[in-house]
Image: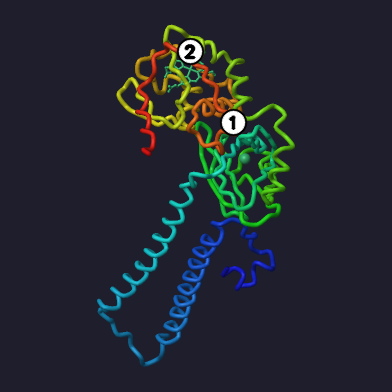
Amino acid sequence: MLARLLFLADLELFPPAASAQAGPIDDLYWFEVIVSAIMTVLIFAAIVLFAWKYRRRPGVEAVQIEGSTPLELTWSILPFLVMLVMFGWGAQLYFAAQQPPKDAMEIFVTGKQWMWKIQYPDGNREIDELHVPVGQPVKLTMASEDVIHSFSIPAFRIRHDVVPGHYDSVWFTPTKPGRYHLFCTEYCGNQHAGMIGWVTVMDQRAYNNWASGGGSQGTLAEQGEKLFQQFGCATCHLLDQQGRCPVLRDLYNKPVQLSDGRTVLADDAYLRESILEPNAKIVRGFEPNVMPNFRGQVSEENVIQLIGYIKSLSPQTPASQQGSQQPPVVLAPPGTPAKASPKPKPAPGR
Ligand SMILES: [Cu+2]
């Protein structure tokens, strides 16, 4: 808003503001720029004024001044309060940026020298192109296949490092249909400058049209199911009748009791670690070193597909994250030891 008043926006010196968070972030930005500008002008004016006022003159001798407590308190406390405003305001925006709304649509991003690979829950895949519907909160779950990248969409005022070894996430709500730049903003090798692309924001109808065009390999969950067979996960997790392997049905977003006594939430990060580093956390009642280590065999994109499949085995998962409207198939054989699953919610009384 302020950017518009300052006519910079129309000169395109400033990126367009195309997300719900762009306005509030710009307001803070301009607040800081204006406070800094006022301070700079005041300080330089005082330097020039005093240099002139107290210049050396013949016959005038300098008098030492002992200082002034009220003055010193004023120039310490006032800037401190202004800084506190910046801190509080910034912290508020920062925390909001970490908390995607529950109904956010989930899209997966994998950074790889030198491209961005995008995977949608409905099975569509793209490279260096991201399509999102206008007005819909979108959460990006991001992984890196190799080195540190940084995912940035200036028009949405989002940027987040994508660090190998775990998931990072950002979220945004696009507000204006159009095409916007997408960058890697962390130097990541000699073709870093080519790691760029486009975000297309479409109205809901156009988006549905676009989305129904692709996904020839099935939904994310179906792609994951294929991998689950290919990598032999199924031989243990589905066919094991002796109860040596945990049942993956109804696992997603549930607490898992570990052999060391801790309880962790089975979120995306936990599932990813369970696949790539099985011995990092051992489920209570099961043995370490049984599940093979899949690091190096399973790419980050494969992990995203496998997680998509495991999610689809949890009926409570919102359809938006599941990517498939079909009721989940119950695959675990009876007789496998159920992990301590939380009590079922009582049905709402009538
Ligand atoms: Cu990069």
- Position of 70 with respect to 127 (left or right) is left
Q: Quadrant of the N terminus?
A: bottom right
- Dot 1: element: loop
Above or below 196: residue 280: above
Q: What amino acid is labelled 2 in the image?
A: Pro
Q: Quadrant of the C terminus?
A: top left
- Position of 346 with respect to 93 (left or right) is left
- By what rule are the colours in the image chosen? rainbow
Q: Of all residues shown, which one is farthest toward the top? A: 242
* Marks 1 & 2, CB-CB < 8 Å contact: no
* Residue 65 position in % (x across, y down): 28, 81
**Label 1 neighbour load within 10 Å: few <14, some 14-19, many 20+:** some
Q: Of all residues shown, which one is farthest toward the right? A: 213
Q: Looking at the image, tell me whether mark 1 or mark 2 is earlier in sequence order.
A: 1
Disc number at residue 157? none
* Residue 85 position in % (x across, y down): 39, 65
**Front residue of 66 and 130:** 130
The residue at which mark 2 appears reads as 333
Q: What amino acid is labelled 1 in the image?
A: Glu
The residue at which mark 1 appears reads as 145
Ligand 1 occupies quarter: top right
Above or below 251: residue 239: above
Alpha carbons under labels 1 and 2: distance apart: 35 Å
Image point 62% across, 55% down: which residue?
A: 155
Disc number lying in front (1 or 2):
2
**Front residue of 100 and 260:** 100
Image point 43% across, 29% down: which residue?
A: 266
* Residue 55 position in % (x across, y down): 42, 85
Q: Of all residues shown, which one is farthest toward the bottom? A: 59
Above or below 118: residue 43: below
